[in-house]
Image (spheres, grey):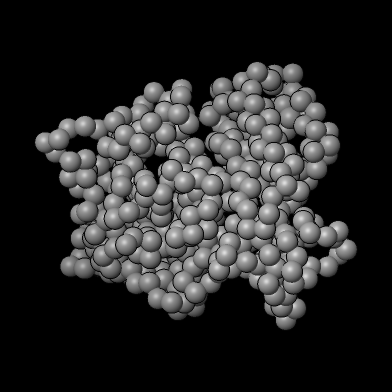
Amino acid sequence: MSSALLIIERNEQILSLLYQDNRLVQVKVHEDNLNKQNNRTGEDKSSSLPLHAIYIGKVKNVVPSIDAVFVEVEKGKMGFLPMKQAKNPIIVNRKYDGRIVAGDEILVQIEKKGIKTKEPGLTCNLSFTGKYCVLTTGKLGVGFSSKLDKNTKTYLKEILDNWKIEELLQVEKVGLVVRTNVVGLIEGKRELESSDVVNSEDCNLEELNGLKEELKKLLEQKNKVLSAVPYRTCFSCLYQPMEGYLADIRDTYEDSFDKIITNKEEIYHRIREEFPTMENVELYQDSRIPLEKLYSVETRLKEALDERVWLKSGAYLVIQQTEALTVIDVNSGKIQKKNSKDDIYFEINKEAAREIALQLRLRNLSGIIIIDFISQNTKEQDSQLLGYLGSLVKKDSVKTNVIDMTPLGLVEVTRKKIHKSLREQLK
């Protein structure tokens, strides 16, 4: 499978577009254009609050009825802080006495971007993200991505125990979450997955040095932020994460793309600066055919916003986003069922399930999703279809759950809200 990660500028936004076999399968939209990205201090008041940035904010209002606090993060820019995300706050202008009150200057991190009329979500549990792990002040100890299999987790735990990581984390008062990308550092991954027993004597301490070095770097970032707190004023940005398109490269599985292509010199040089060992980065400079035309970007984006999606079988999906939920209808189109014993509808539903899993990721659909598949012959087929859809959405980097099928035959799916949908993000 050929694949490419395209990074372009469009309508004062930077887009990361992942193509597989010439089909667009994922779009990430980043609000800052190239002129704004050079200002990385967090002081640009015209842009939204950057996700994962850390600020000293001012508590404007405490609302016990909803168990939350409203914090002014920058002048005129408010954020929403649930009290459950403020268990151990760092208050700058007074000693913490178990309460958060109006006027407190408090250290907060942007956890969720504002969606529609909702303010950005804040947390006092700071996190610092790398390619292989996440450092957090919210929960002590070691955790692992739920996408890692049991044997891999056991193998990693043996290595971390040899490194005495638990003791280090207790001293630093932080927690560590090992990300799925760490499998790229493990030699013989296929043999590891098929093995029933992991022997600690066989653990290769050196192959995970990339994880160890990254942990050291993240600890330095954390300590730098906390040491700066007493010397910074309210509304200061103490930590600015890397640009969104760079985070996309860092977070995408290494085998997800063969090459990275951009037609912007600024982007090319930033990628080379941030990932100096990466060899598959290309600067596209052919003036005869623009990069956007070569990859039919506008056509592919238009298709990603259309309500109707055609399947190879001749059936199609109708995808409709509403305020409360997203509805997906599977329509057989011109396909005619030959007889009652024919399993053609089951095959169409499986094809639709594959396309739905892709469309959820491509359009960044989230919240409640209701799917109306074509009615099938047996309950056994319904159960098989649910299991098949569940196996497909497990591959999504955003947490997605297939809940159940209602008595009316509607399949309920939930997908975690992290960013706005593609329709909302594109200008």
The residue depicted at 21 percent of the width and 68 percent of the height is: 333
Can you tell which quarter of the image residue 326 is in?
bottom left
Q: Is residue 176 above or below residue 198?
A: below
Residue 284 screen position, x and y as percent: 24, 33
Residue extending farthest to the right is: 97
Against 197, is 338 above or below?
Answer: below
**Which residue is depicted at the point 58% across and 68% down?**
78
Of residues 114 and 329, the one drawn nearer to the viewer in this rendering:
114
At which x and y percent is residue 39? 47, 46
Between 252 and 213, the residue placed more toward the observer is 213
Observer-nearest of 276 and 169:
276
Q: How many marks?
A: 0
Among the 4 quarters of the image, the one containing residue 61: bottom right
Q: Is residue 163 left or right of residue 283?
A: right
Q: Most extreme residue toward the bottom, as rendered? A: 65
Q: Quadrant of the N terminus?
A: top left
Q: Where is 46 relative to 172, above or below?
A: below
Q: What percent of the width, then of the height, locates residue 100?
A: 79, 67
Q: Residue at point 56% right, 32% down?
A: 183
Residue 15 appears in the rendering: yes
Q: Quadrant of the C terminus?
A: bottom left
Asked if residue 386 can be seen in this view, the reply is no
Q: Is residue 262 left or right of residue 380?
A: left
Residue at figure coordinates x 36%, y 37% from the top left: 267
Residue reaching furthest to the left? 288
State the image coordinates of residue 255 (x, y, percent, origin top left).
43, 33
Instruction: Return the residue nearer the eye: 195 or 83.
Output: 83
